[in-house]
Image (spheres, rainbow, N blue to C red):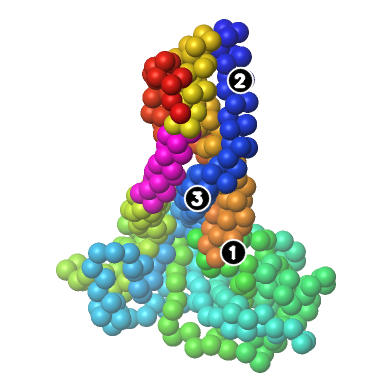
Amino acid sequence: MYRIFTSFVEGFKIALSSLWANKMRAILTTTCIVIGIVSVTAMNTITDGVDRSFDESMDMLGRNVVFVEKWPWGFGGEYKWWEYRNRQELELAYVEKLRDLVPSASAVSGRIYRSTTVRYDDRNAEGVGINGATASYFQTAGLNIDQGRAFSEADEQRSARVVVIGSGVAEALFPGMDPIGKRVRIRGQRFTVIGTLESQGSFLGMEDLDNEMVIPVGAMATIYDLRYGLRLSVQFPNEEMMADGEYEVIGAMRQIRGLDPMEDDDFAINKAALFEQEFQSMKVAIYGIGIFLTGLALFVGGIGVMNIMFVSVKERTKEIGIRKAVGAQSWEILLQFLMESIVICLFGGVIGVLLSIGVTELINQIFVAYLDWTTVLNAILLCTFIGILFGYLPSSRAAKSDPIESLRYE
């Protein structure tokens, strides 16, 4: 056991001295591994980031909420947009009718979305999402109040010009100030800020949900045409009840619309599960492409390591003969060169992981990425595996070399 330990230590020292003696060659070989590890780590951070962002986004969307809209969410398959375009628009009166016809629902809300620039004094917040909604929208959308309050049904009924703003809007318009009670301008009309929302982050890493605000739907009618774009949200106590509740919503909507039994639905039922189904197929494609590209990068890096190890074995043929002549076992020679291969790969792996931290931050500026400690550990283990896999053949040739022939080598 002691001899094995000392062989490991000695092999590590020899590997370091050999790499130091051939610095440029070692740098070029390590660069191949660095590229491979950065590729692997970047791919993992993207897929991990997408997974985390997707789960968070589905929680935001509401796994126990059914959305009734004119247009279905367009995911693959046959999307008959020409038929959907001619459908009758939904009406705000459906909110109360659904509350009566779907007793198992815990809340029903209506919401119309537009986008505009919001102003306060000389400050502007551009591209702000304006949600004209019923008071129950805060519940169905899972919105939590950070400061102040949400507007009430009384505010909704009298079309009060009040607004609840997202954290991003608050930072843009009221840096270092308390926004409650301030009056902002939306399309030339003044609205009083009565509350702020807790930070929500982004939806699927793209849409900033903190750059939004909510106003009573009646007040929305004073600045926008509400004849199109209404979404109805029907929330159920849990996902199990939603499974049956979805059919209740379909039946209620058909009754509200006055459809005959043989007529097709002239509305769309959307839910988070549609995103999840599409995401699974998309994730398989992303993973497949990622595995191919990262595998190719690592294979090229491994070939570079194998090539340089063959050169190293050739250059040190006489050294191998001397070591065998003084009693070194074949497994010790094998271990020596394997250690050199592993050290090259580990150095490349460490540098690759450090570069990946910066790459992850860069990706986060335009998409989503998450660097987990397991990704770092897997990268190090992968480097060790590559070192063993691609270093074994040259190391084995060194271990099997004839000591007499090695001593004669010039």
At label 1, which amino acid type do we have? Gln
Residue located at (49% from left, 23% from top): 318
Tell me if residue 15 comes above or below residue 298 in the rendering.
Answer: above
Q: Which amino acid does label 3 sit on?
A: Ile
Residue 24 visible (yes or no): yes
Q: For the residues marked 1 and 3, what is the alpha-carbon distance in whole angstroms?
A: 21 Å
Q: Which of marks 1 and 2 is in front?
A: 2
Q: Could you tell me which secondary element the residue under label 2 belongs to?
A: helix
Residue 60 appears anywhere in the view: no
Instruction: Please provide percent x and percent y for residue 226.
Output: 48, 84
Q: List the residue tagged with mark 2.
A: 10
- Residue 119 locus on image (x, y percent): 70, 85
Q: Of all residues shown, which one is farthest toward the left?
A: 262
Residue at mark 3: 35
The spot of residue 169 in percent (x, y) is 68, 73
* Residue 149 magenta-highlighted: no
Q: What residue is shown with label 1?
A: 365
CA gap, disc 2 and disc 3: 29 Å
Disc 2 packing (10 Å; few <14; some 14–19; many ≥20): some
**Boundaries of the magenta span:** 292-312
